[in-house]
Structure formats: structure tokens, C-alpha cells
Image (cartoon, grey):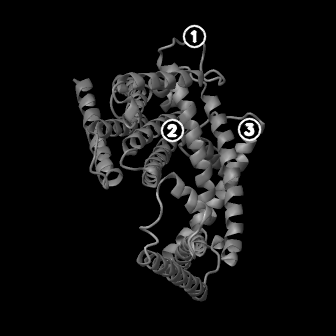
């Protein structure tokens, strides 16, 4: 009876997660597209539902909700379904919709979709060869074989996003990185933009007048046709045609300049608004957060370097370790086990909420940037694939943030994976991503004033 109650709780939560994923699909991703494939919508929502269920099971593990046997069963079921979606279903439909957009392959699109899926499976399987990710005794169709490879891709993605976010967050929030922009700078650039637009209009008028004059003279309709006419038009030019081609080249150059001036004007307006916003109370709060994240970024880069150099992986979760150090330093009586449970619950909850929110915001921006009416289905499936791998790898890494007594079922379900490898791999990719982001933002920040002066 208790198993049925536990299962009803899990099914109800999955239905709610599925509904949220469905609404996010309709209201955010596909709100500007009338053509929708329901299979894409269902796959995205199911992937989101089972991804969130894994996080729910982590919280249930800490709080002791549901029976241990029920949690173990739903962990196994959840992992099997999410791996089935990520390894078999989503790649096949990505290949199917890619082939559907190619007219020459319409008659045999199912066959070519299978060929693309087999190609994906080959590279997906070969991905595990260079990494020490699991014990060789596992079978070829075991959960460990699949989740180990999904974990490599997901941890790499997480580390790339974390490294860039740790650097970009203080760069975005801190007013220190804002260049000084005045109303005079904006007015001068807008004046240049208006002058450029006037020059474009005047030159296009000259071209239009010249074409009308040529038409009135009959120089357009009386042009010789055929092969000899083409030779004659090349060897003999109409009076003023060279001037027209030169004017057209000047118009093209001015239009390119006007685009650059428009983008620079919009950038100056955005910077001016950020300067005004930084003077408000909320802006000062985010500026303080920027300094905090700067310290966190430096500390994270330092710790990642130490972990890589000394091949170090923590054995105790950071909450318990931090409480033990504080208690020993202050010399007070404190129930470390009791409070580590509650603080771990809060910490893991914050990590889960921020991970889901941050990833959905990033996916939405990415979708709007590159999607079109033909490619939207493929891109949504790619986002579902990224989202599922990201959340599966999050479980691998969040496991280290939990006290030892709450890792038991998660470790049993995930199998004999080389968990230490994933943490070292995360540190390596995070360090490369953070340092690359620092270099990129430094060059962009340095080049911005020079570009403004050049314009």
C-alpha cells in the first residue's frame, strides 16, 4: 500500500513537471511559430519532467520522504527513461527532422534517419574509449555504459557554462566595467547616423533619376539582346553607366556604415541606461553582488587549479566540512549531523532551482538567436538533448554536496562510475572556460572604446 502511495506522489509530481514543460514550450519557445510538431512538444516536456524528477528524488533523499525501496525503484525507472530518451529517441527524431528538410531525401527519410542515428551511436560509443569512466566488467547495455558517456558530455557542458557564467556575471553586474557615456556622445553619434542616412537617400535619388532619364531616352528598352548584344554591351558602355556603378558602390559602403553606427548608438543607449540603473538601490545591490561573484570566481579558479595540480577530490561534502571546521575553531557544542542535513537541503535546493532557471533562460536566448520556421523543431530537440544531459550530469556532481548517508541510493543506482574523474574533468574544463572568458571579455572591453573613437 505504501508503494502505491509513493508512486502516486511521484506520478503526480511528474504530471506537474510535464505541464510546466508544456507551458514553457508554448509560451516561450514556440510562441512566434504556428507550425508545431506535437511529437517534439511531447519529447521536450517529458525530458523536462524526468529531469526535474531526478532533482526531486535528491531532495526526497535528504528529507527521507517515501520509503527507501520506493525511492530506489523510482530512481531506476527515472534513469532508464531519461537514458532511453537521450540516447535513442531524441537523436533519432533529430535525424528524422533534418532529413525532412532536405527535398531529395523525402522518399527515403526514414532510412536516412536511421543512418544518422547509427552514426550518432557510433560516435557516442567511441566517446567513452579515451576516458576512465567506468569498470570494464559492465555489460554493453548496462545503465553504467550509457550514463557514463552522457555524464562526460553533460559535465563538459556544465563546466563551460559555469566558467563563462562565473566570469560574465561580475562583468555584467559591476559598474566598474561600464565605460563613461554622456548625452553629448550619443547626440554626436546620432547626428552622424542621420547624416549618413541623408547621404544614402540623396545618392539613391541620383540613381533613380538617372534610370528614369535612361528609360525616357529609350536606352533601357532598346538594349540589344542575344549573344552579340551581350558582347556589344560589354565593349561599349552607355554614358553615365560608370558613374552609376560608382554611386552604387558608395551607397553599399554607406549602408554598411549606417548599420555599424546604428548598432553603436543602440549600445551607447544601453550603456547609458545601465549607468543610470547602477545609481539606484537595486543597481547598487547588483553591483555588490558583482564584487561578491568576482571573489567567488577567483576562489573557484584557484581551487580548480589546486585540485588539478594535486589531483585532489573532496571526500566530505562542503557543508559538513565547513561546519566541522567552524565548530572546532570556536570550540562549541554543536550537532553537526543534524544541522548538516538541513543546510545541505537548503544548499541543494538553491543549486537545483538556479540550475533549472539558468538553463531555461540560456536555452530561450539561444533558441531565439538561431531558430527559424524550418529549423525550430530540430533546435528544440537539440535543446532537449542538452537539457537532459545537463541535468543527469548535475546529479553526478550534486552527489558530492550531500552528506555520506544520503549518497547511498544514488551511488547504487548510478553504479560503479568513476565519480572522481567527473569532478576532475569539471575542474579542467571550468578552468579553461573561465580563463578563455576572461581573455575574451578583456579584449572586448579594450576594443570597445577604440571602436567608438574610430566611428
Q: Quadrant of the N terminus?
A: top left
Residue at position x 69%, y 51% in the image: 436
As displayed, is residue 234 above or below residue 374?
below
Mark 3 touching mark 2, by CB under 8 A? no
Mark 1 touching mark 2, by CB under 8 A? no
Q: Position of residue 308 (x, y in %)?
A: 73, 38
Mark 2 crowd level (few <14, some 14–19, many ≥20, 10 Å Cα): many
Q: Earlier in the sequence, mark 3 or mark 1?
A: 1
Q: Quadrant of the C terminus?
A: bottom right
Residue at position x 46%, y 72% in the image: 219
Query: What label sits on residue 373 in the rendered view?
Result: none
Mark 3 crowd level (few <14, some 14–19, many ≥20, 10 Å Cα): some
Residue projecting furthest to the right = 309
Q: Position of residue 432 (x, y in %)?
A: 69, 45
Between 318 and 376, the residue placed more toward the observer is 376
Q: Earlier in the sequence, mark 3 or mark 2?
A: 3
Q: Which residue is mark 2?
A: 394
Q: Which residue is mark 1?
A: 137
Q: Position of residue 298 (x, y in %)?
A: 70, 55
Query: Real-space Cα distance between discs 3 and 1?
Result: 28 Å
As displayed, is residue 261 above or below residue 90?
below
Q: Earlier in the sequence, mark 1 or mark 2?
A: 1
Regarding mark 1 in the picture, which secondary structure is present there?
A: loop
Query: Real-space Cα distance between discs 1 and 2?
Result: 25 Å
Regarding mark 3 in the picture, which secondary structure is present there?
A: helix
Regarding mark 2 in the picture, which secondary structure is present there?
A: helix
Query: What label sits on residue 308 in the rendered view?
Result: 3
Between 198 and 161, the residue placed more toward the observer is 198
Query: Real-space Cα distance between discs 3 and 2?
Result: 20 Å
Amino acid at each position: 500500500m505504501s508503494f502505491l502511495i509513493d508512486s502516486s506522489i511521484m506520478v503526480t509530481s511528474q504530471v506537474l513537471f510535464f505541464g510546466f514543460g508544456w507551458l514553457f514550450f508554448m509560451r516561450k519557445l514556440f510562441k512566434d511559430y504556428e507550425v508545431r510538431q506535437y511529437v517534439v512538444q511531447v519529447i521536450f516536456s517529458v525530458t523536462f519532467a524526468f529531469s526535474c524528477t531526478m532533482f526531486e528524488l535528491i531532495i526526497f533523499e535528504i528529507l527521507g520522504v517515501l520509503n527507501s525501496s520506493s525511492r530506489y525503484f523510482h530512481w531506476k525507472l527515472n534513469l532508464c527513461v531519461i537514458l532511453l530518451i537521450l540516447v535513442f529517441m531524441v537523436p533519432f527524431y533529430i535525424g528524422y527532422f533534418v532529413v525532412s528538410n532536405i527535398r531529395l531525401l523525402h522518399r527515403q527519410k526514414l532510412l536516412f534517419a536511421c543512418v544518422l542515428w547509427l552514426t550518432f551511436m557510433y560516435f557516442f560509443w567511441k566517446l567513452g574509449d579515451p576516458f576512465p569512466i567506468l569498470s570494464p566488467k559492465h555489460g554493453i547495455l548496462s545503465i553504467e555504459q550509457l550514463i557514463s558517456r552522457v555524464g562526460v558530455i553533460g559535465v563538459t557542458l556544465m563546466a563551460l557554462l559555469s566558467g563563462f557564467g562565473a566570469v560574465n556575471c561580475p562583468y555584467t553586474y559591476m559598474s566598474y566595467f561600464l565605460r563613461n557615456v554622456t548625452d553629448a556622445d550619443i547626440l554626436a553619434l546620432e547626428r552622424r547616423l542621420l547624416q549618413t542616412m541623408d547621404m544614402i537617400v540623396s545618392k539613391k535619388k541620383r540613381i533613380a533619376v538617372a534610370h528614369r532619364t535612361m528609360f525616357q531616352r529609350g536606352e533601357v528598352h532598346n538594349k540589344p539582346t542575344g549573344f552579340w548584344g551581350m558582347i556589344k554591351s560589354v565593349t561599349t558602355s552607355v554614358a553615365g553607366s560608370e558613374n552609376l556603378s560608382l554611386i552604387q558602390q558608395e551607397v553599399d559602403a554607406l549602408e554598411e556604415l549606417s548599420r555599424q553606427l546604428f548598432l553603436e548608438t543602440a549600445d551607447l543607449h544601453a550603456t547609458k541606461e545601465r549607468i543610470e540603473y547602477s545609481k539606484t538601490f537595486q543597481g547598487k545591490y547588483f553591483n555588490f553582488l558583482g564584487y561578491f561573484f568576482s571573489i567567488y570566481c577567483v576562489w573557484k579558479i584557484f581551487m580548480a587549479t589546486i585540485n588539478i595540480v594535486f589531483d585532489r577530490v573532496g571526500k566530505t561534502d562542503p557543508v559538513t566540512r565547513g561546519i566541522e571546521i567552524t565548530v572546532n575553531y570556536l570550540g562549541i557544542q554543536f550537532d553537526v549531523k543534524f544541522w548538516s542535513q538541513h543546510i545541505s537541503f537548503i544548499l541543494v535546493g538553491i543549486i537545483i532551482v538556479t540550475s533549472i532557471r539558468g538553463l531555461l533562460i540560456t536555452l530561450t536566448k539561444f533558441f531565439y538567436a538561431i531558430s527559424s520556421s524550418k529549423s525550430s523543431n530540430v533546435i528544440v530537440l537539440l535543446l532537449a538533448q542538452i537539457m537532459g544531459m545537463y541535468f543527469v550530469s548535475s546529479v553526478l556532481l550534486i552527489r558530492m554536496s550531500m552528506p555520506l548517508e544520503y549518497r547511498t541510493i544514488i551511488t547504487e543506482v548510478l553504479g560503479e562510475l568513476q565519480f572522481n574523474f567527473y569532478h576532475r574533468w569539471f575542474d579542467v574544463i571550468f578552468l579553461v572556460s573561465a580563463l578563455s572568458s576572461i581573455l575574451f571579455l578583456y579584449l572586448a572591453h579594450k576594443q570597445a572604446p577604440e571602436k567608438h573613437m574610430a566611428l
